[in-house]
Amino acid sequence: MHRTIARLLCLLILCLPNGAIAADPRLERELRELLEWLPGRYAGEVPDPANAASGKRITLYHKIVRIEAPQFGETVFYHQISRDGFDADRPAQQKIYAFDRNPERTENRMRSWVFYPNQGGANLEKDPAAIAALQAAALMNFPLECAIKWRRGARPLSFVAKVKREECSYRSAAFRQNIRPEMTYELTRTTFGIEDILYGESGAPLFPSAGVLTVARVPLPASPAAPAGSMAAVLAASKADEWRALDPARTLYMELDAGRVIIELAPRFAKAHFANLQALVANRWFDGLSINRVQDGFVTQWGDASERKPMPYAERKLAPEFERAWTKDVPFDALRDGDVYAPQVGFVDGFAAAGDRKQGRIWLAHCYGVIGVGRDAAEDSGNAAELYAVIGHAPRHLDRNLTVIGRVVQGMELLAALPRGTKALGFYETAAERLPIRSVRYASEVPEEERTPLEALRTDTPSFAAVTEARRNRRDDFYQRPAGRIDLCNVPLPIRVAR
């Protein structure tokens, strides 16, 4: 009887071996996303926080980097705020953040410590000895009730954290009085915002607030040590007009609990399937469906697991679009290295393509990250209601046997790192194993401020040619014998956040 009760209790509290307690999976997913998004450099023009009423604006720089500082916690960041650059010798403010990894937590908490004015320690991340010597007692140490509690924001792909003044109080040595702070943090993939209001013993703010000061993420510069001709050096030297913004009308956002998967579509190769997909997405057909199959080294697949959901607004069957005519209007950027599967290979609209000029046929290649249309044995059984992403070594034998409709440009890790299905072909055994799809939307349907502004390097540019050469003949110190050739699916297709 006691064993039965113990088992029931373990089910209720998510017991692990030896009596440990498992963390809430939702909180773990959110924490992984926070830890991925938070570090970086951010800059932008904002109202002067030191003189909010003046109308003056300044440029504010934030640098947030992960550091090894176990005296503060397992997952620790250093945050430097400056007015004169990312590596200022006299920053306006410095902070230490430590995330709570306690599996019993009910929210994702971030403890904060603040350096005293003129305490020194600028650009701390560059000095491991200084980090090791730093102790919490030497900083403004907020009590536990002042922990910054991160939650998903009302906008998609955003996080918000607040500290409410009625929940937090501490004695400030700097201001020589009890302080009640009210803090707001806002984080997206491309922006970081913060507001600190300090209420003194009189109940009034010590300084007027300028609101949440939001600045944009700045891409990291290439390492100064990057060898000449390396991929990093080439991309750092690329020109703005060599990049193209993704077209919102052919960019899909698939929202999962773990984050956003961004898919660029290729209507030039699959017009009928693209139109069917438009109808499905417009009628919210994918919302609430699931990822149903993850086969190791092969594909992740999603759609209607029941195969019974009505779709009156789209075609049930479509003629296959495995390949298309190679006409003069198809912009083809050739790769000179050759291929096992086709006489010619290269790129069309940024997609890896293969073809046969003599036969006048061209098709998209099954490279890692490619999105294809699932089907049964009948060639006309695919309709874009069931899609898959290649997560393993390029299965080029699928070329011209399935319709390729696009590729993942961001969020591939959310599809490739999923638990593998245990049924035949990697399908999940039970409904509980399937991963829910929150929504699928075209970027054009999403408010502009909620989009992820990505750019792709054009494949008809000198920089893309140089990137390909850098990967064909690696110049990194590690490579002693450059390959001298490159496979179509090994050519990187650089994507970046728009500058």
Image (cartoon, rainbow, N blue to C red):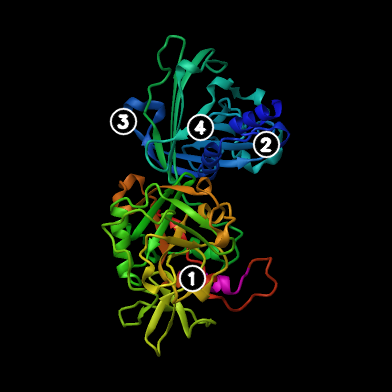
Figure quadrant of residue 318 = bottom left
| Disc 3: CA contacts within 10 A as few (<14), some (14-19) or many (>=20) | few
Disc 3 + disc 1, Cβ < 8 Å: no
Which residue was labeled with disc 4?
92
Near-viewer residue (372 or 192): 372
Whole-percent x, y for residue 411 in the image: 48, 53
Q: What is the three-letter code of the residue carrying label 3? A: Gly
- Disc 2 residue crowd, few under 14, some 14–19, many 20+, Cα 10 Å: few
Decide if residue 174 is on the left or right side of residue 436. right
Decide: few, some or many residues near mark 4? Use Cα within 10 Å; few <14, some 14-19, many ≥20: some
Q: Which residue is mark 2?
A: 16
- Residue 258 placement (x, y as % from top left): 49, 45
Callout 3 secondary element: loop
Q: The magenta stretch spans which residues?
A: 464-475
In this view of the protein, can residue 115 be seen by the observer? yes
Mark 3–mark 1 distance (CA, rounded to whole Å): 55 Å
- The answer to whether residue 100 is seen in the rendering is no
Residue under the image location 54 percent in, 25 percent down: 147
Which mark, by number, is residue 366?
1
Report the Cα–Cα distance between label 3 and label 4.
20 Å
The residue lying toward the viewer, choosing from 199 and 409, is 409
Q: What is the chief secondary structure element of the magenta stretch?
A: helix
> The residue under label 4 is which amino acid type?
Ala
Q: CA distance from mark 2 to mark 3?
A: 56 Å
